[in-house]
């Protein structure tokens, strides 16, 4: 916060010398995700739940230039709908909360501590390949790839093994991001072991118990999606 800036209620929640405080961590993560092509053009976002607070990136901000004072802070728990019912402890001036907010809240209701949304080209491409190969309602599935060992098998089940099959549900895109919430929640219910949901022609939502696990899983999945696209080019199957 600059010395001349007005101090507003909730500002103290985003001021910390701890580099891993959510208000410091979200801008740092988004800057890294920008270099990976995940959050270009202000798209995508990240949210972290810590204790009784949810920290969430704003909408329409250059993700690589985000600052801690841009972060929204909500009380937890807080309603998903209607938006005006949400309890904001801190709402930066002239900024809008991410349109991903209700989807992030859905992940937190499932026990997540961090949720990441990217517009990864590899994620988009695999949704198109699955539709082309297996039909609109199919999941992305792959097996006998070392990197799937970076993905949890489900709550309390440890990690997937080399010979296990990774399954990621795919939902259809909508004109407005918040309208994806119902489809995301249905995918979570139908696939209770999943830690990610792909959105066709859009990207991915991935979550974890904390930011370290969410980041690790998102990176592992993006590697797998890129590998799957290259395998498809070579005519190699995703399943043995």
Image (spheres, rainbow, N blue to C red):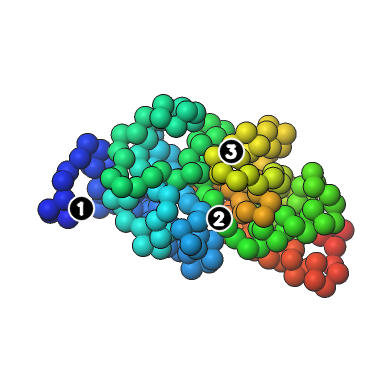
Total number of numbered labels?
3
Query: Given this view, does label 3 or label 1 mark the residue nearer the observer?
Result: 3
> Could you say where residue 228 lies in the image, as x and y percent from the top left?
74, 63
Q: Residue sitting at 52 percent across and 50 percent down?
A: 116
Instruction: Look at the image and tell me in which quarter the C terminus lies.
Output: bottom right
Label 2: which residue?
118
Whether 135 is drawn above or below 32: the answer is: above
Report the Cα–Cα distance between label 2 and label 1. 28 Å
Mark 2 falls on what kind of element?
strand
Q: Residue sitting at 72 percent across and 55 percent down?
A: 127
Q: Toward which corner of the image does residue 27 lie, by quadrant?
A: bottom left
Which is more N-terminal, label 1 or label 2?
1
The reply to whether dot 3 and dot 1 touch (C-beta < 8 Å) is: no
Which is more N-terminal, label 3 or label 2?
2
In this picture, residue 132 sits left or right of residue 113: right
The reply to whether dot 2 and dot 1 touch (C-beta < 8 Å) is: no
> Could you say where residue 82 lies in the image, as x and y percent from the top left?
47, 28
Out of 121 and 222, give the one closest to the viewer: 121
Label 3: which residue?
179
Whether 181 is drawn above or below 172: the answer is: above
Report the Cα–Cα distance between label 3 and label 1. 34 Å
Q: Is residue 157 visible?
A: no
Q: Toward which corner of the image does residue 12 lie, by quadrant?
A: top left
In this picture, residue 185 sits left or right of residue 10: right
Tell me, for residue 1, which label it has, or none: 1
Tell me, for residue 184, which label it has, or none: none
Q: Is residue 76 visible?
A: yes
> Could you say where residue 201 lies in the image, as x and y percent from the top left?
67, 55
> Could you say where residue 121 lies in the image, as x and y percent from the top left?
63, 63
Whether 188 is drawn above or below 207: the answer is: above
Q: Residue furthest bottom?
A: 234
């Amino acid at each position: 916060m600059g010395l001349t800036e007005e101090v507003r209620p909730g500002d103290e929640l985003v001021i910390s010398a701890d580099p891993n405080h959510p208000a410091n961590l979200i801008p740092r993560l988004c800057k890294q995700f920008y270099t990976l092509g995940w959050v270009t053009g202000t798209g995508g976002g990240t949210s972290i739940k810590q204790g009784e607070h949810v920290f969430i990136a704003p909408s329409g901000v250059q993700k690589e230039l985000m600052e801690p004072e841009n972060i929204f802070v909500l009380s937890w728990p807080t309603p998903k709908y209607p938006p005006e019912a949400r309890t904001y402890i801190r709402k930066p001036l002239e900024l809008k909360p991410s349109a991903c907010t209700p989807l992030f809240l859905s992940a937190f209701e499932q026990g997540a501590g961090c949720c990441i949304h990217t517009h990864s080209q590899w994620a988009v491409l695999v949704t198109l390949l699955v539709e082309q190969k297996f039909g609109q309602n199919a999941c992305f599935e792959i097996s006998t790839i070392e990197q799937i060992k970076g993905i949890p098998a489900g709550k309390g089940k440890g990690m997937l093994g080399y010979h296990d099959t990774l399954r990621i549900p795919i939902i259809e895109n909508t004109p407005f991001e918040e309208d994806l919430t119902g489809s995301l929640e249905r995918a979570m219910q139908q696939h209770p072991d999943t830690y990610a949901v792909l959105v066709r022609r859009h990207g991915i939502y991935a979550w974890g118990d904390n930011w370290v696990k969410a980041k690790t899983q998102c990176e592992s999945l993006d590697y797998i999606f890129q590998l799957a696209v290259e395998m498809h080019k070579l005519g190699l199957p995703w399943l043995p």
